[in-house]
Image (cartoon, coloured by chain):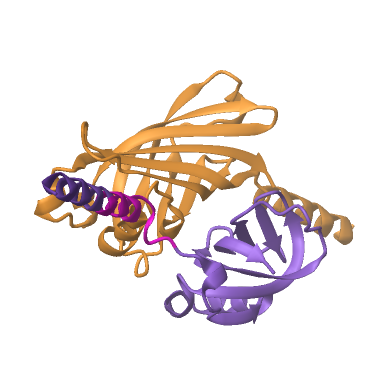
Amino acid sequence: MKKNRVIISFVIISILGFLAYQYVMHGGARDLSTEKTDYIISSKAILNEFTTNQDLSNKKYLEKAVAVKGTITSVSANEVILDNSIICSLKNPNSTLVKNQIITVKGRVVGFDDLMGELKLDQCFCN
Amino acid sequence: MKKTAVLLICFFIGNISFSQKMMTRSGEIKFDATVPNEVEIIGINKTASCILDESNGHFVALVLVKAFKFKAPLMEEHFNENYMESSQFPKSTFDGKIISFDASKLSSTKTSYDLEGDLTIHGVTKKIKTKISLILNAGKITAASTFSVKAADYKIDIPNLVKEKFAENIKITLNFVLEEK
């Protein structure tokens, strides 16, 4: 009887320990594919907002999940560039995309790079 | 005659304003605030932008704070929300000069230069002085530098409770491969 109790408590403690470890090491990550899209917008419109008022746009868009529509001007395994101005880092490599294709990319707004005049998104994927 | 003069002037003005710019948008910046025998605190950003003006050594770089990646997402969250306050200060920048830079003297052997300029982190701008090494290879310039900053200098508050887990001097390493655009 006593032995059983020891085993059970040991198992419970190890499970708790494992969950705590999982939470610390992997918890808190976002999964955009299950999140609702905050803004659906064209590449030109969002870029225009950032170039006219960066502070306001930062408040509005930073960290938000957006779906941006535009024409692919450059594509590599992990990165898609829309209209030379929206840099999208893909979450998973996608080899089906081609140049000049018009697509909608969903991703997280990382920020506006005023050195290059580009908007950066990450964790991107296309439906 | 007048026309030729105008054309000539245009030609010269064009020449002056045209300067060779080397740039990247996939520069790597890594910071390391690990204390020996403590939890590893390393953030890596592979999307830094940088422009080097070859005519005068003007060197500017920009990095978006939210693009720093950590091993643990929770650490990334704390970094953004508690320390860097990246929603308020989304970017860190450097604007400076490579001292006595001469594009014609670049070669495939590593040469070290002095780099001086303004570093802005967390909305605070400080003058820094460090070394930068440049290598020219197949039309691309590899720029690498390592320097240390103190969190307190940039008004980044680290609670006393966890202070021992953060290195006082945070090591920043940058590695940019610049190419013509």
Across and down, in percent, residue B155 comes to: 21, 57
Is residue A101 visible in the rendered structure shown here? yes
Using the image as rendered, state which of residue B116 and residue B110 is in the foreground. Answer: B110
Residue B172 lies within the magenta run: no
Give me the chain that's orange: B
- Quarter holding residue B55: top right
Across and down, in percent, residue A98 comes to: 81, 58
The residue under the point 53% across, 72% down is: A34
Q: Which range of residues does the magenta coloring cover?
A: A15-29
The answer to whether residue B164 is left or right of residue A71 is left
For chain A, what colour was chosen?
purple
Most frequent secondary structure within the magenta stretch: helix
Using the image as rendered, state which of residue A52 and residue B88 is in the foreground. Answer: B88
Using the image as rendered, state which of residue B108 and residue B19 is in the foreground. Answer: B108
- Quarter holding residue B36: top left
The answer to whether residue A85 is left or right of residue B48 is right
